[in-house]
């Protein structure tokens, strides 16, 4: 018990939680935007891989870190566009298309990696985002190490939470997006384009997801490995429900998951001798399921989620 | 008079259904044109082509611009119709329920690229419109929590907010109380003075005769005639619409039998006042129609939910046929012999994606006639559907077509067929004739009275006082979650009770 308390009070624990949460924040916001418009995007896992790959290879090719991020977002947007075209105007199954995108984006990424570096035994390393060193802020006690010694991408993720919240709730575009996910007819009757809004949302959401992937190769690590996304995309799909499609709660959910994960690693070193390590690896997922069970009962589903809309039909 | 709109030879075909066949229609400035026709005649289809929801198979539309110049309207684009000054209130709500009324009204009116929304200005404009039109709706409550009547007002406000010069209203008063409807038309009348032209669709001949200047009638997709309202009366219109006279159902006296439904001291604490009931007591006997009059949003939803098994009481007892129902749910209530005609027929009455035939058997899937060992008996379902479609005159693309393709009136007939075929002991009829044409409404009335003659007890919830007065043996008024015996059949007195005057004060008056 004392150990847990000690862990919970340590700066490094909270810093790690936020670091682990960062890609999830991007991913869950991206999924949230897609689903708010009424389109489930199960391509997320593959888009994470594509983002990780695209960002890293762009930096390696000399695009610079921010250029790499832009490239990752474009790659995500590209796969999002394919998903959107299949599911919105054509109205195909969102599940099938999404899973297809995941398989497709993952394989394409591995393919490019192999063709670009046919002989490499280990991937070339890039110079990733460095922890920030801000005057005053980074030196604050506790807050400093937890918040202001993260990389710029974590700051970007937190900024995105505010931005997405603002756009959804305070702008005309956000209101239209919420409407199209609830009742596409409401948007159509006011002369707005249902297809345009949905396609735009899926592309933008997918670009955000790809940034989550890029965080892995450009901030958490410094190179691309097979299997490095490791289910993070799927976690985001669950977190959106936990968040009840609200950006603020999405941040909370991602942080909670990050905290579980960070705790798990530390407990493993503390009491690892007595309990098999796999139990700790499982713990964040089991706890997430519990959190989901409790939160999802009150979840506020976009009413038109999964329902295609066609012009001129009842 | 200056022409503002002309529809030229509009034709629309859905599969084998010819919904509109070369329809021509003109509208003049300041005119109020009533578009009439039976359910499924093609009124909504015609207006949907005008507004750009449907692409016509043939024909053109010309609209006058601000200077009065007629120009062709690009078809198939609601945006173009809105820009040309055409506003439309749809027959079915086109509201986002997760947003409040303000956002719904302003949606699409401001450019999507705008970073900051000027909500204050929007609110001021809406409040101005609410004041001048008399259509009041709460702006800050999620639309999902509004009553049907309030939602309808939001729909109309949406069109007015866009400064429409031509206003199309597809059954705008179907869910409004008579007072609200009159107020709406009076305000529309005032607005036509300022150059607004109106096309409205309605099945209520009273308001058509009172408020329109001209009448156009569709039958089976063909325009069969036009007439100046001054030259028309109910008989003439009915004959134009149906091609024959419609018989009126009469209610003969009957002695009530044993109680079929008893609510004893029932309270429901809902999320808001509108879906709460406080300590109500109600008894419905065999051979009896009990009318519940009231303005929507006064607890009808909770009462209907209770009787249909969708809601639970927090206090009190529900007894059906002398047996207490301890844990009501829809299945239990259906088994106990309760037939339900829900208020929102599209949402709660049918499953739109399933066929007409399937919807007709959906409440008795464990019936061995329909199913054996978990396998559906398709032939029996189809035969059942063919019979009911004929008996209840359900018009549409056929038994195997999706139920959502039916017109509103025909959806109601489908539901009636499903309910009445089960010979229910108790029938909950919630706004059963809302949106139905005269013939279909008379049909519903006739079927309800038939069920009564057979021995069913009927709870008729309605905002339409004329309907309640015509059908009910006993009238109760619901207000603010409380139920009071009206004790009178006086229109005026009941109207006042609906508005919240105390029953005790009124019953003293001579009736
Ligand atoms: N999108 C569609 N697909 C297939 N059939 C349709 C569609 N829209 C309308 N119909 C059919 O066209 C016919 C005309 O329907 P419409 O809704 O225009 O009738 P209406 O006159 O408005 O009736 P009501 O008074 O019941 O509203 C009906 O037979 C209907 O089933
Ligand atoms: Mg109609």
Image (spheres, rainbow, N blue to C red):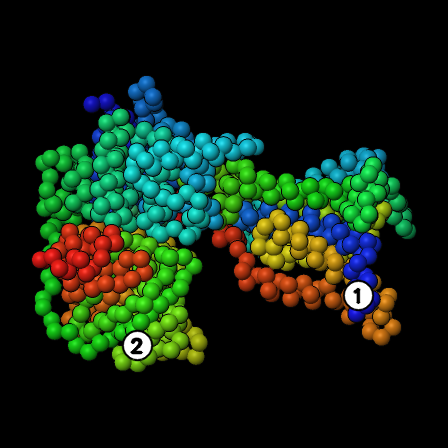
Within 10 Å of disc 1 (Cα), the crowding (few <14, some 14-19, many 20+) is few
Q: Quick check: can you spot residue B388?
A: no
The circle on residue A28 is none
Describe residue B127's horizontal placement relative to residue B255 as left or right: right
Q: Residue at x 13, y 43 (%)?
A: B237
Q: Is mark 1 within 8 Å of ligand 1?
A: no
Q: Position of residue B499 (x, y in %)?
A: 24, 52
Q: Quick check: can you spot residue A246?
A: yes
Within 10 Å of disc 2 (Cα), the crowding (few <14, some 14-19, many 20+) is some
Decide: marks 1, 2 in contact (CB < 8 A)?
no
Identify the element where label 2 is drawn: strand
Describe residue A22's horizontal placement relative to residue A3 as left or right: left
Q: Position of residue B210 (x, y in %)?
A: 16, 39
Q: Nearer the viewer, mark 1 or mark 2?
A: 1
Q: Chain of mark 1?
A: A
Q: Compared to A104, does B197 lie above or below?
A: above
Quarter location, residue B325: bottom left
Q: Residue at x 19, y 78 (%)?
A: B258
Q: Label 1, on which residue?
A: A4
Seen from the viewer's position, the closer of residues B285 and B447 is B285
Identify the image quadrant of the N terminus of chain A.
bottom right
Q: Residue at x 69, y 54 (%)?
A: A254
Quarter location, residue A124: top right
Q: Residue at x 17, y 33 (%)?
A: B213
Describe residue B473's horizontal placement relative to residue B144 as left or right: left
Q: Label 2, on which residue?
A: B319
Q: CA distance from mark 1 to mark 2?
A: 57 Å
């Amino acid at each position: 018990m004392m150990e847990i308390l000690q862990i919970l009070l340590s700066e490094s624990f909270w810093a790690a939680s936020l670091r682990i949460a960062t890609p999830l924040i991007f991913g869950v916001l991206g999924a949230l935007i897609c689903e708010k418009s009424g389109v489930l995007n199960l391509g997320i896992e593959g888009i994470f891989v594509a983002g990780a790959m695209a960002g890293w290879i762009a930096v390696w090719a000399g695009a610079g870190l921010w250029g790499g991020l832009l490239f990752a977002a474009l790659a995500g947007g590209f796969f999002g566009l394919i998903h959107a075209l299949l599911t919105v105007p054509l109205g195909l199954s969102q599940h099938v298309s999404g899973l297809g995108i995941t398989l497709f984006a993952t394989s394409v990424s591995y393919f490019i990696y192999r063709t670009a570096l046919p002989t490499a035994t280990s991937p070339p390393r890039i110079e990733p985002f460095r922890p920030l060193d801000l005057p005053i802020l980074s030196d604050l006690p506790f807050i400093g190490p937890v918040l202001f010694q993260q990389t710029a991408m974590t700051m970007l993720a937190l900024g995105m939470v505010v931005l997405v919240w603002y756009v959804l709730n305070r702008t005309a575009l956000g209101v239209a997006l919420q409407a199209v996910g609830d009742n596409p007819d409401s948007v159509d009757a006011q002369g707005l384009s249902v297809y345009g809004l949905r396609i735009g949302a899926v592309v933008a959401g997918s670009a955000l997801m790809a940034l989550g992937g890029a965080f892995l190769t450009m901030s958490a690590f410094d190179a691309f490995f097979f299997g490095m996304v490791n289910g993070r995309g799927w976690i985001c799909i669950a977190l959106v429900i936990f968040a009840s499609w609200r950006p603020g709660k999405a941040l909370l959910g991602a942080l909670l998951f990050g905290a579980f994960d960070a705790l798990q690693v530390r407990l493993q070193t503390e009491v690892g001798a007595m309990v098999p390590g796999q139990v700790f690896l499982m713990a964040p997922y089991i706890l997430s399921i519990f959190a989901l069970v409790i939160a999802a009962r009150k979840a506020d589903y976009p009413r038109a989620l999964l329902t295609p809309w066609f012009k001129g039909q009842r | 008079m200056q022409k503002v709109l002309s529809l030229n030879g509009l034709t629309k075909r859905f599969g084998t259904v010819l919904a509109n066949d070369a329809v021509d229609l003109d509208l003049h400035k300041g005119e109020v044109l009533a578009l009439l026709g039976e359910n499924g005649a093609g009124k909504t289809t015609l207006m949907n082509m005008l507004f750009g929801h449907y692409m016509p198979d043939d024909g053109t539309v010309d609209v006058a611009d601000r200077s009065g110049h007629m120009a062709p309207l690009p078809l198939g684009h609601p945006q173009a119709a809105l820009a040309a000054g055409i506003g439309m209130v749809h027959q079915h709500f086109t509201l986002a329920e997760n947003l409040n009324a303000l956002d719904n009204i302003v949606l699409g009116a401001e450019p999507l690229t705008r970073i900051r929304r000027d909500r204050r200005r929007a609110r001021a404009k809406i409040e101005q419109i609410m004041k001048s039109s008399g259509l009041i709706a709460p702006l800050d409550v999620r639309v999902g929590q509004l009553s049907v009547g309030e939602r309808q007002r939001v729909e109309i406000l949406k069109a007015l907010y866009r400064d429409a010069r031509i206003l199309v209203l597809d059954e705008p008063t179907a869910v409004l109380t008579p007072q609200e409807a009159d107020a709406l038309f009076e305000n529309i009348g005032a607005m036509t003075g300022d150059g607004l032209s109106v096309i409205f669709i309605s099945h209520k001949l009273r308001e058509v005769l009172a408020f329109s200047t001209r009448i156009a009638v569709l039958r089976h997709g063909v325009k069969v005639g036009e007439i100046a309202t001054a030259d028309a009366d109910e008989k003439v219109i009915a004959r134009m619409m149906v091609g024959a006279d419609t018989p009126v159902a009469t209610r003969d006296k009957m002695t009530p039998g044993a109680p079929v439904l008893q609510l004893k001291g029932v309270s429901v604490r809902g999320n808001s006042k509108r879906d709460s009931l406080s300590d109500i007591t109600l008894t419905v006997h065999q051979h009896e129609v009990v009318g519940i009059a009231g303005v929507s949003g006064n607890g009808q939803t909770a009462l209907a939910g209770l009787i249909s098994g969708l809601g639970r009481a927090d206090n009190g007892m529900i007894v059906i046929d002398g047996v207490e129902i301890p844990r009501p749910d829809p299945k239990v209530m259906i088994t106990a012999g309760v037939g339900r005609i829900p208020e929102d027929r599209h949402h709660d009455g049918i499953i739109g994606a399933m066929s007409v035939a399937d919807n007709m058997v959906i409440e008795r899937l464990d019936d061995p006639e329909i199913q054996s060992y978990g396998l559906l008996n398709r032939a029996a379902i189809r035969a059942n559907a063919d019979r009911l479609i004929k008996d209840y005159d359900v018009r549409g693309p056929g038994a195997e077509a999706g139920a959502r393709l039916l017109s509103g009136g025909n959806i109601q007939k489908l539901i009636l067929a499903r309910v009445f075929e089960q010979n229910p002991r108790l029938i909950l009829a919630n706004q059963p004739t809302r949106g139905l044409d005269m013939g279909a409404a008379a049909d519903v009335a006739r079927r309800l009275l038939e069920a009564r003659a057979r021995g069913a007890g009927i709870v008729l919830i309605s905002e339409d006082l004329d309907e309640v007065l015509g059908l009910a043996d006993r009238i109760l008024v619901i207000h603010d979650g409380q139920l009071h015996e009206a004790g009178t059949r006086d229109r005026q007195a009941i109207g006042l009770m609906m508005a919240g005057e105390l029953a005790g004060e009124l019953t003293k008056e001579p009736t």
